[in-house]
Amino acid sequence: MPGELNNFAQGYIENPERIKKLYKRTLIIIVISQMFGGAGLAAGVTVGALLAEQMLGTNAFAGLPAAFLTLGSAGAAFSVGRLSNRLGRRMGLATGFITGGLGAIGVVFATVFNSVPLLFASLFVYGAGTATNLQARYAGTDLATNKQRGTAVSIAMVSTTFGAVAGPNLVDVMGDFALSIGVPELAGPFILSAAAFILAGIVIFIFLRPDPLIIALNINTNKKNTILNETLEKKQSNKKGITIGATIMVLSQIVMLAIMTMTPIHMGHHGYSLRAIGLVIGFHIGAMYLPSLFTGILVDKFGRTAMAIASGITLLLAGVVAAIAPADSLFLLVVALSLLGIGWNLGLISGTALIVDSTEPSTRAKTQGTVDVFIALAGATGGIMSGLVVAGSSYETLSLAGGILSLILIPVVIWSRSGKE
């Protein structure tokens, strides 16, 4: 880093109160950007599969939108992570959000011209917004202490709730708006996404100064008591922590995305309106983020592995309820998708805290980006397989299989207990 940055960071080393103030300010900026980002990600979740079914004329490939979106998310996670590692969180996150907004605009044009290739290409680009929305959770942890990391992640995530819950419930409103300007109804939510992602990027670009990752890196470099030579045992412990954290998040993502992707299709086949579908998905997304008010505190207080076990059990319950729920029971679908969101939340926050615990500032963003690539690829796999499973069997089979898969989290956690969290 340039000398002036080191000197600037030195002021933070010598004044811990400045670090605390910057930590709090960073969280405020992340909260604001995540409110917009949450609204941006809701469109793909709510109407992506319905849009593909409408344009393709079959539900066998209804999982493809989620697959392209998550593949794009994987590429963006890799790029945003490395860009953040080189230039700081500000440039990485701002670039990712704005790219996602441009992808949402592409989806709108794809519906206007009824172009399936443009739809899938645009969803791939739109995935950058989803990846960035997820990676923003790390920015709040850069200046957090060990006992603050779970809470910092939770604050970033719970702020997503405001936009993420509002988005699905604006499906009808945005659909009417789209029709009023001559655009197909299902493209309406993507108009909202475009504006929301671009606004999130602008907020990050203008206000995330000084950059928390750059400050954290310089503080780490300048500390007089930094241990320069880590032992092999510590390095192995760090690698194990990264592996465990990644595995927890990957399994949670597969189960969550597979069941979530096909729920709108399942509901559509049983005569539910867009409003009802938006309601269920709204509860689901709310459950993905709103519990963060408590999850981060629980993760910091009771440990990462205990909450990972809770994640596996909750996801199992979600799969079972979705599988046994009568098709005409909107209430049980809300319960199932809410449990699905809570289970994902528990897995993501506990896994994220493990990743942060196990990385150093100099490589943290790059490692986090790489882990999020695997999470996104897992989501793509879940999205593709979900459509094929439902087409070949049923939604009930998919839900039950997802719940059973989540139990793998328990042996992963048992293995993790052989070392430090």
Image: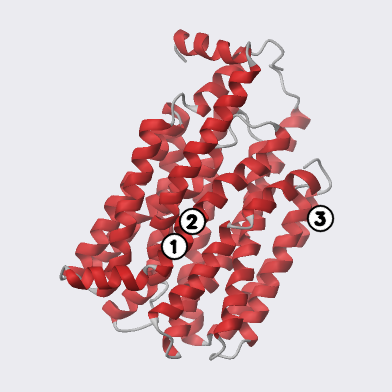
Q: Which residue is mark 2?
A: 162
Q: Where is 79 relative to 107, above or below?
A: above
Is any atom of residue 163 visible in this view?
yes
- Residue 117 sits above or below residue 324 on the image: above
Q: Residues within 10 Å of mark 2 (few under 14, many from 20)?
A: many
Q: Nearer the viewer, residue 383 or 280?
A: 280
**In-front residue for pair 202/421:** 202
Q: Quadrant of residue 16?
A: top right
Q: Disc 3 or disc 1, which is closer to the eye?
A: 1
Locate residue 165, reporting x and y percent: 48, 63
Give percent across and percent down for residue 166.
44, 62
Q: Secondary structure at mark 1?
A: helix
Give coordinates of residue 174: x percent, y percent.
Answer: 30, 67
Q: Residue at x 67, y 57 (%)?
A: 346
Q: Which residue is mark 3?
A: 414
| Picture quadrant of residue 360 | top right
**Where is the C terminus found, in terms of image quarters?**
top right
Q: Which residue is mark 1?
A: 166
Amino acid, disc 1:
Ala
